[in-house]
Image (cartoon, rainbow, N blue to C red):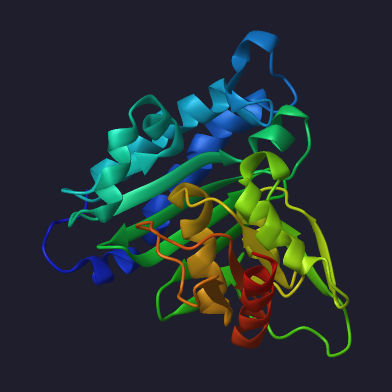
Amino acid sequence: MIESNGTVEEFPDRIASAVEEAIREAAATEIMPRWRQLAAHEVDRKTGPHDLVTDADRKAELYLTEALAALLPGSVVVGEEAVHANPLTYEAIRGDAPVWIVDPVDGTRQFVHGEDGFCTLVALARGGVLHASWTYAPARGQLATAVRGRGAFLDGERLTSGAPDPGRDLEVATSHPDFTTDEQKHALLGLRTPGVSPRACGSAGLEYLAIARGRLDAVAFSWEAAWDHAAGLLLVEEAGGAHLTRSGEPFRITGGNTLPFTAARDAATARRVADLLSDGA
């Protein structure tokens, strides 16, 4: 357990190894034994055919909820599955207490299909400000971390997102049409232009990691759920990237954003994509 004195800005250094251990243990205990071993009764639909939940999601979130809350007295946990069961749980993100934002299996569809493109996402925030994040892809053996003001790292190596090569089409991962309104679909049409190569996104967390590594230029997403974005947004920021909504403001995990929004390898690319989204609206 961590003592409750000090500020939340000081907590990441003191608990980073314990958080990493909890994430790895949740994956080893609850996620990986079910990968490519799921029975039909262990998979359910939530809002539609592309919005799946499994026993791995539920049990890993329960594990992390208990472990993370114990590490930081007075903190609360906002997890995807808990919010699905009780939407009021989400309000903690807007409160004053330190909050752990958890997506136990980001990329559940890929997980269900036996692919390796899934990850566990954890972020620590307070008052809408992100302070630390963890992105763990257990099937790939990758762990990416970020602490505000101290950089982003993948397996201990510093990440630098860089800038897209001049003259090359921008590769932009975009929301699945099932998760977009008609207005958002029109906005995303702004990316159907020379010089941009849009494609459907996979795991949001792994797309953010690809940006931080300089292997993807940008994303354009149309939903606000903080568990999908919090860890990745801080990772991208600390690697040198930027994020903007269509209104030209940075994305806020507390909500009220003009959607779709973008995160990109650098500020110029973020502005270019945000402008295209506005032109398409």
Quarter of the figure with the C terminus:
bottom right
Q: Position of residue 90 (x, y in %)?
A: 32, 42
Coordinates of residue 32 in the picture (x, y in percent): 64, 32
Residue at 84%, 90% in the rendered image: 166
**120, 158: nearer the viewer:** 120
Q: Residue furthest bottom?
A: 166
Q: Quadrant of residue 199?
A: bottom right
Which residue is at the far top? 41
* 178 sits left or right of 7 in the view: right
In depth, the one of 95 and 198 nearer the eye is 198
The relative height of residue 182 versus residue 238 in the rendered view (above or below) is above
Is residue 19 placed above or below 272 in the rendered structure?
A: above
Q: Is residue 145 visible?
A: no
Q: State the image quarter where residue 3 is shown.
A: bottom left
Instruction: Name the residue rendered at 18%, 69% in the picture.
Output: 7
- Quadrant of res 174: bottom right
Q: Nearer the viewer, residue 117 or 279?
A: 279
Above-or-below relation of 34 to 238 = above
In percent of width and height, residue 259 lies at: 54, 60
Which residue is more in the foreground, 110 or 222? 222
Residue sitting at 59 percent across and 85 percent down? 267
Total residue callouts: 0
- Give the answer, above or below, for where 169 lies relative to 11: below
Q: Does residue 73 appear in this view?
A: yes
